[in-house]
Amino acid sequence: MTGSALTIGRLARAAGVNVETVRYYQRVGLIREPAKPSGGFRIYPPEMVDRIRFIKRSQKLGFTLQDIAHLLELGDGHCDDVREQAEAKISKIEAQIKDLQAMRKALKKLVIECRSGNHRGHCPIVQSLANKS
C-alpha cells in the first residue's frame, strides 16, 4: 500500500469525519464501498474526500441525508432542480424560524409571569405545561 492510498481511516481524516461516519454513509448509500482485495484493505478514490465534504456541508445547511442523496443524484448539470430544492429548504427554515419565534414569545411571557410573583405559590411555567387544554 502506498503512502497516498486512501484506506477508510485516511479517507475519514482527510474528509474531517470519523470512520463510523464513512461506514454510515456507505450503509445509507451515499458513498460506495470499494471492493476488498483478498488479504488487503479497501482503497477509496481521492474524489471520495470531496463527496464526504459535500455531504457534511449540505448537512450544515439543513439538508437531510435523503435530500443530499437527491442532490448527489442530480449532480452539477441540473441547476434548476437544485435551486428548487434549495428554495424548498428555505421555506422550511422560514417556517421553523416562525415556530421558534412563537415558542420564544410564549416562554418569555411565562418567565415574566413567573418573575412577577403574582402566581400564588404555583409556578406559571409548570401550570402552563400541565394544562390539559
Image (tube, rainbow, N blue to C red):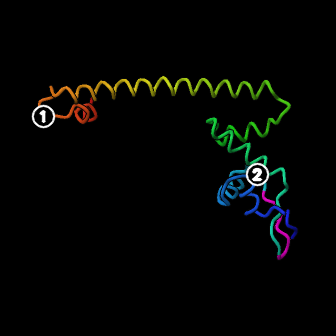
Q: Amino acid at mark 1?
A: Gly
* Image coordinates for residue 2, horizontal then vertical, percent: 88, 68
Q: Residue furthest bottom?
A: 39
Give the side of residue 66 with respect to residue 11, left or right: left
Say if the magenta span includes residue 36. yes
Q: Badge 1: how crowded within 10 Å, few (<14), some, or many (20+)? A: few
Q: Residue at x 11, y 30 (%)?
A: 120
Q: Nearer the viewer, mark 2 or mark 1?
A: 1
Q: Residue at x 34, y 25 (%)?
A: 106
Q: Disc 2 to disc 1, how far (Cα)?
A: 58 Å
* Image coordinates for residue 1, horizontal then vertical, percent: 86, 70
Residue placed most toward the observer, 67 or 10? 10
* Image coordinates for residue 37, horizontal then vertical, percent: 85, 70
- Magenta segment boundaries in residue numbering: 33-39
Circle 1 SS class: loop
Prevailing secondary structure class for the magenta stretch in the rendered image? loop
Quadrant of the drawing holding the C terminus: top left
Q: Amino acid at mark 2?
A: Ile
Q: Residue at x 33, y 26 (%)?
A: 108
From what the image shows, is residue 37 above or below residue 64? below
**What's the mark number on residue 31?**
2
Q: Residue furthest right?
A: 2
**Residue at image mark 1:** 121
